[in-house]
Image (cartoon, rainbow, N blue to C red):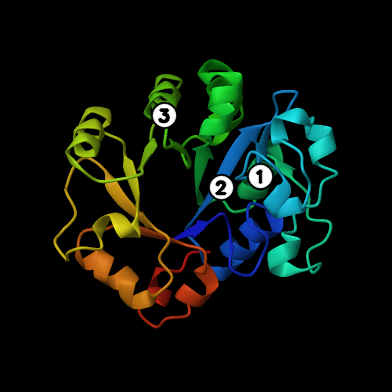
Amino acid sequence: MVAHRGYMLNYPENTLIALEAALRAGACAVEFDIHLSKDGVPVMIHDIDLARTAGLDRFVYDLTAGELQQVSVHEPERLGDRFQGETVATLSQVLDLLRRWPRAIAFVEIKRKSLQHFGHEQVVNSIMNLLSPLLERCVPISFDALAVRMARDRGAPAIGWVTETWDDEAHALARDLAPQYLFAEDSCFAENQEPLPAGPWQWVIYDVTAPEQAMAFAARGVSWVETKAIGEMLQDPQLSKRRCG
C-alpha cells in the first residue's frame, strides 16, 4: 500500500513526520510532491502556494529553500497547532529519511506548476540529480507525460504517469508511454466492476480509504492502492498481511 503524502489523515501532509509515521505504520511505499524553491532547490510540498498548509499568502517559487525551511506547514485549519514547527523539507532531507527505511519505495511527484514556472529541463534535472543514488526505489511520477519521459531518459528505471481521466486518449498515451506504474483516481473506474485495462504497468489507484474498496480494486487487477489513512487501512485483518517495515 502507498501512503498518500505520508500519513495524511493524522499528520500534516508532505512533512517528514507524516512520511515517517506512514512507514512506521507499515506502508510499503510513500508518495510525496516536489516543487522547486526560488533558488532551484527541490522541496516537498503539494500546493504552489502556502495558504492552505501554512496560512501564508506566498508562493513556493518566491522563497528560497532556506526561507521555506522556516515556514511551518502544519495545516492549522485542519489540524490546529498540534504540529506547529513542522517546516517545509527539502528533497535531500526526504532522501535521508528514506535511507533509514531501505525497503521502502518512494513515488516522487514532479508538480506541473513548477514545470510551468521553471521549465522542464531545470525541474527534471534538479530532481533526478538528487534521486540518482536511490533510483532503484525512487520512482519519478507526474501528470506531465513529458516530465516522466525525461526522467526515464535521465536514468530512471521506473516511471509513473498520473492520468486525470480514463478514456481512449488516455489509454493511447499510456500505451505509448508504457510507464511501470499507472496512477488514476478511484472515480475514474467507479461506474463498473470490470478489470482495469492491462498493460506493461502496475495500476495505482487513489485515494482509497475503505478496506473493502481496496480489496475490490485488487480483484480487478490493481496492484497498489494509495491512501491518506495508511494506519487505519493496515489495521484491517486482510490488509494487515500487506504491511511492510
**Which mark sits nearer the N-terminus, 2 or 1?**
2
Q: Are marks 3 and 2 in contact (CB under 8 Å)?
A: no
Front one among 80 and 87:
80
**Marks 3 and 1, how far apart at CA:** 20 Å
Q: Are marks 2 and 1 in contact (CB under 8 Å)?
A: yes
Which label is found at residue 148? 3
Image x and y of residue 29, in percent: 48, 55
Outermost residue to the bottom:
237
Is residue 135 left or right of 37 when viewed as pictured?
left
Which residue is depicted at the point 63% across and 51% down? 14
* Mark 2 or 1, closer to the camera: 2
Disc 3 and disc 1 in contact, CB within 8 angstroms: no
Q: Is residue 17 left or right of residue 175?
A: right
For label 2, the residue is: 32
Residue 165, image x, y percentages: 30, 45
Which mark's residue is nearer the viewer, 3 or 1?
3
- Quadrant in which the N terminus appears: bottom left
Tag on residue 94? 1
Marker count (numbered): 3
Q: Residue at x 32, y 72 (%)?
A: 213
Asked which secondary structure carries label 3, the reply is helix
**How busy is the neighbourhood of tag 2: few (under 14 within 10 Å), some, or many (20 plus)?**
many
- The answer to whether residue 22 of the structure is visible from this angle is yes
Q: Earlier in the sequence, mark 3 or mark 2?
A: 2
Whole-Å distance between the Cαs marked 3 and 2? 15 Å
